[in-house]
Image (cartoon, grey):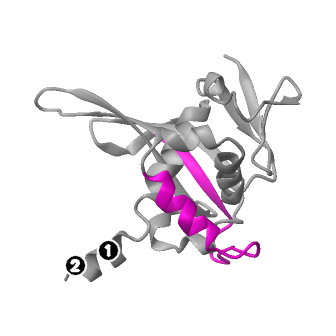
Amino acid sequence: MNEITLTSQGVIVSEGRPIEARRPLMFLSAQVKLASDCTLRSYFKLIENYPLLSELNPFFAASLEQYRKSPAGGCQDPSLEDLLLTKTIEMVGFPGKPRLEIYHSLYGRQGADLYEIKDFPLENLLDMPLRLGKLKHVVFGDKVDLFEFDTVFTLFELIDAILWELSFHGTLLACEIRR
């Protein structure tokens, strides 16, 4: 599997060289590594540096607008140490017809505790360090005997998973407005 690195400035580096802004799609299936100083802001810079990537999902417009309205720095929540992207494979449906579900989650992390990011304003998360976590394997809902494995994330998984989690920001406000 080809390996790329996402820098803190949102630049994709392949074989030691930045890739051209017009050519990101060929790297969607590549294994992505994050530079140690990557933050959630690096993710948004990635989309700004490679605008073609914003066409992968209709939620980008709203998230980018919210990002651009945020302060240029100092956007950290003191109750979190970093943001952690995880991958879960869950076998469900027993008894009955078993099936396999694969999904990603982005959490705020403090020590061993994980928190859903929808409970934090985006402007408090942008400068939080971004980390890639492990694969969690859940068998038929047994979350007590959870297995964890080292895994890889593709560029597409990184982009799509983070945006999916960010799409829930503002949901509570939207519900309040409808009442």
Three-letter residue code for mark 2: Arg
Q: For mark 2, does the 10 Å Cα neighbourhood hold few (<14), some (14 to 19), or many (20 or more) residues?
A: few
- Please provide percent x and percent y for residue 171: 35, 69
Q: Is residue 89 left or right of residue 3?
A: left
Three-letter residue code for mark 1: Ala
**Quarter of the rendering occupied by the C terminus:** bottom left
Q: Are marks 1 and 2 in contact (CB under 8 Å)?
A: yes
Choose top left, top right, bottom left or bottom right for residue 133: top right
Residue 113 - label: none
Q: Can you identify the residue that label 1 sits on?
A: 174
Q: Is residue 34 positioned above or below 1 on the image?
A: below
Q: Is residue 171 visible?
A: yes
70 within the magenta span: yes
Q: Is residue 128 positioned above or below 60 on the image?
A: below
Q: Can you identify the residue that label 2 sits on?
A: 178
Query: Which structural element holds mark 1?
Result: helix
**Quarter of the rendering occupied by the N terminus:** top right
In the image, 45 versus 74, the foreground residue is 45
106 within the magenta span: no
In the image, 99 versus 125, the foreground residue is 125
- Please provide percent x and percent y for residue 172: 34, 75
- Please provide percent x and percent y for residue 115: 49, 65
Residue lying farthest to the left in this orientation: 96
Residue lying farthest to the right in this orientation: 16
Choose top left, top right, bottom left or bottom right for residue 96: top left
Choose top left, top right, bottom left or bottom right for residue 176: bottom left
- Please provide percent x and percent y for residue 36: 81, 48
| Segment colored magenta | 59-87
Q: How many marks?
A: 2
Q: Is residue 66 positioned above or below 38 on the image?
A: below
Query: Which structural element holds mark 2?
Result: helix
Residue drawn at the location 75% of the way across and 76% of the way down: 74
